[in-house]
Image (cartoon, grey):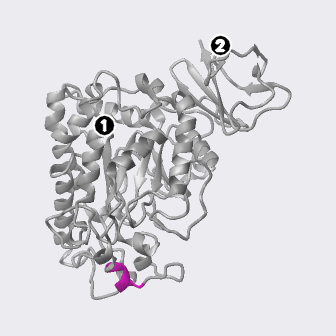
């Protein structure tokens, strides 16, 4: 990640064939009750499709894609993990050698040799999964190889990998096993660029001189084969991933994404693919920002340029027009661990961002950068658990929802599910009266989501007027449930 251009449920036996025994075991434990519900978030369990429904082998390919995307859209909230030897230097992952500068106090030679000291002896993957569940996150995505080329898995095709560090253990395998034990879907981030590989670029030069790759060199097909072998390893030697999350920098077409995606569909048809390998993919991936309006089909979400208000239609589009998307974001300003970056987003800001994303029909992939020892720093844990406390009482307004019918209310956001509209109130009104403008549906009942207290309401010429308490029950986001006809 960093400074760069952005752009179904089988029977249990069939699921074993399509996804591999390990992943299928994790998911099959959820059959009959929906996808995994973190502790304290069982109220929303019924709203998520079961994997048996999603991966029906008798369904058409179009129907399979629709079902697996439905589960993804219902899950809403995931954990991103950027980690590697770079954590020893408290610098961003990969970018200090790609765009060196005074903000990164490490030379290229120092950076590429950090793995020789990398020994995260406190790494406890089960603790990571437990933390994600406490936060209300429904899936995890781990960086298996970033642009620097260092593999966090025991690849057979490179020596630049975690099992050649003092730690020697396979990070990806360990997290995969923990996710299986706890029923947590796991995805793999994999960067097609590779600053370490001599077929990707002329490694006699500094990375900063040719980090975009050199596809005109005769070695390029060899590099594409290397990349394909890595993807095959991740699918076949490890638990088949819930998602393969590519990050191709610019000119992504040079990675022959059509071939890679076709291979993924053949080896693991249940695996989702994002849009950063030169082909559209299953969903778009804006970074560090949220669209101002609901994205629609025909709009590729790669960068902030595509997220300006004049690029998106006003109001709520038809459901079939909505583009699948997931925004990824850091808790401070760095993807990897940086002890000097104290610019943490508040718990309130992160909760409201999650709500904002859900109100526009997207998913929120929130990143952590573990320490060199393998722990997640206290500031991140504090915020994640804070989100989890809010989700414990309000998750029904997030899981399984889609974009809300009101997109421009000044005091909050709306999400929707079936005949319910969830009104998220960030700024509490004065005078015990909340005006809801332009709500077309007929409202039958209004209640507090947390506790279920019924509220008086009156239809008005412009919408609805609701009598509310003097003070906000939850100053971060109080949620009202409007049952509609």
Magenta span dominant secondary structure: helix
Classed neighbour count for the residue bearing mark 1: other residues with Cα under 10 Å, few (<14), some (14–19), many (≥20): many
Secondary structure beneath disc 1? loop
Closest to the camera, between mark 1 and mark 2, is 1
Relative to 263, residue 455 above or below: above
Residue 414 placed where, x, y %?
62, 31
User: Would residue 28 appear left or right of 337 to someone viewing this image?
Assistant: left
Q: Which residue is mark 1?
A: 183
Residue range highlighted in magenta: 107-112
In the rendering, at what x and y percent does residue 114 appear? 34, 77
Q: Residue at x 36, y 36 (%)?
A: 69
**In this rendering, is residue 384 above or below 206?**
above
Which quarter of the image is occupied by the N terminus?
bottom left
Name the residue tied to disc 2.
445
Discs 1, 2 touching: Cβ within 8 Å: no
Residue at 22% in and 55% down: 260
The question of residue 236 being in magenta is answered with no
Q: Nearer the viewer, residue 71 or 7?
A: 71
Q: Is residue 301 left or right of residue 407?
A: left
Mark 2: few/some/many CA within 10 Å (<14, 14-19, 20+): some
**Residue at position x 21%, y 44% in the image:** 265
Instruction: Say whether disc 1 or disc 2 marks the residue closer to the N-terminus.
Output: 1
């Amino acid at each position: 990640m960093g400074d760069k251009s952005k752009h179904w449920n089988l029977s249990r036996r069939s699921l074993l064939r399509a996804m591999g025994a390990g992943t299928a075991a994790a998911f099959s434990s959820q059959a009959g009750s929906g996808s995994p519900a973190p502790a304290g978030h069982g109220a929303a369990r019924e709203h998520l499709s079961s994997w048996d429904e999603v991966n029906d082998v008798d369904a058409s390919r179009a129907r399979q894609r629709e079902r697996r995307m439905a589960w993804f859209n219902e899950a809403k909230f995931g954990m991103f993990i950027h980690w590697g030897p770079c954590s020893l230097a408290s610098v961003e992952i990969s970018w200090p050698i790609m765009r060196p500068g005074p903000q990164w106090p490490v030379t290229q030679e120092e950076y590429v040799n950090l793995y020789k000291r990398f020994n995260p002896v406190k790494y406890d993957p089960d603790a990571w999964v437990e933390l994600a569940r406490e936060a209300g996150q429904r899936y995890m995505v781990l960086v298996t190889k970033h642009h620097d080329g260092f593999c966090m898995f025991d690849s057979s095709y490179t020596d630049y990998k975690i099992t050649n560090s003092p730690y020697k253990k396979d990070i990806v395998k360990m997290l995969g096993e923990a996710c299986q034990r706890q029923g947590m879907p796991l995805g793999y981030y994999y960067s097609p660029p590779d600053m370490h590989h001599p077929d990707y670029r002329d490694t006699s030069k500094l990375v900063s001189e040719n980090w975009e790759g050199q596809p005109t060199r005769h070695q390029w097909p060899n590099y594409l084969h290397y990349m394909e072998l890595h993807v095959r390893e991740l699918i076949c030697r490890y638990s088949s991933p819930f998602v393969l999350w590519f990050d191709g920098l610019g000119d992504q077409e040079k990675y022959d994404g059509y071939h890679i995606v076709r291979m993924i569909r053949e080896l693991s048809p249940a695996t989702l693919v994002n849009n950063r390998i030169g082909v559209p993919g299953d969903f778009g991936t804006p970074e560090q920002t949220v669209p101002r309006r609901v994205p629609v089909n025909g709009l590729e979400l790669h960068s902030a340029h595509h997220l300006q208000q004049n690029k998106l239609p006003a109001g709520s589009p038809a459901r079939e027009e909505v583009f699948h998307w997931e925004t990824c974001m850091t808790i401070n300003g760095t993807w990897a661990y940086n002890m000097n970056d104290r610019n943490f987003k508040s718990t309130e800001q992160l909760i409201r961002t999650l709500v904002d994303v859900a109100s526009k029909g997207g998913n929120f992939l929130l990143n952590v950068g573990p320490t060199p020892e393998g722990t997640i720093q206290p500031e991140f844990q504090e915020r994640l658990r804070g989100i989890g406390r809010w989700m414990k009482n309000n998750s029904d307004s997030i899981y399984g929802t889609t974009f809300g019918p009101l997109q421009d209310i000044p005091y909050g956001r709306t999400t929707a599910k079936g005949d319910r509209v969830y009104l998220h109130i960030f700024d509490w009104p004065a005078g015990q009266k909340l005006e809801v403008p332009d709500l077309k549906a007929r409202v039958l009942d209004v209640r507090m989501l947390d506790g279920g207290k019924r509220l008086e309401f009156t239809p008005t010429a412009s919408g609805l007027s609701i009598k509310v308490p003097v003070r906000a029950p939850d100053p971060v986001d109080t949620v009202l449930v409007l049952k509609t006809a």
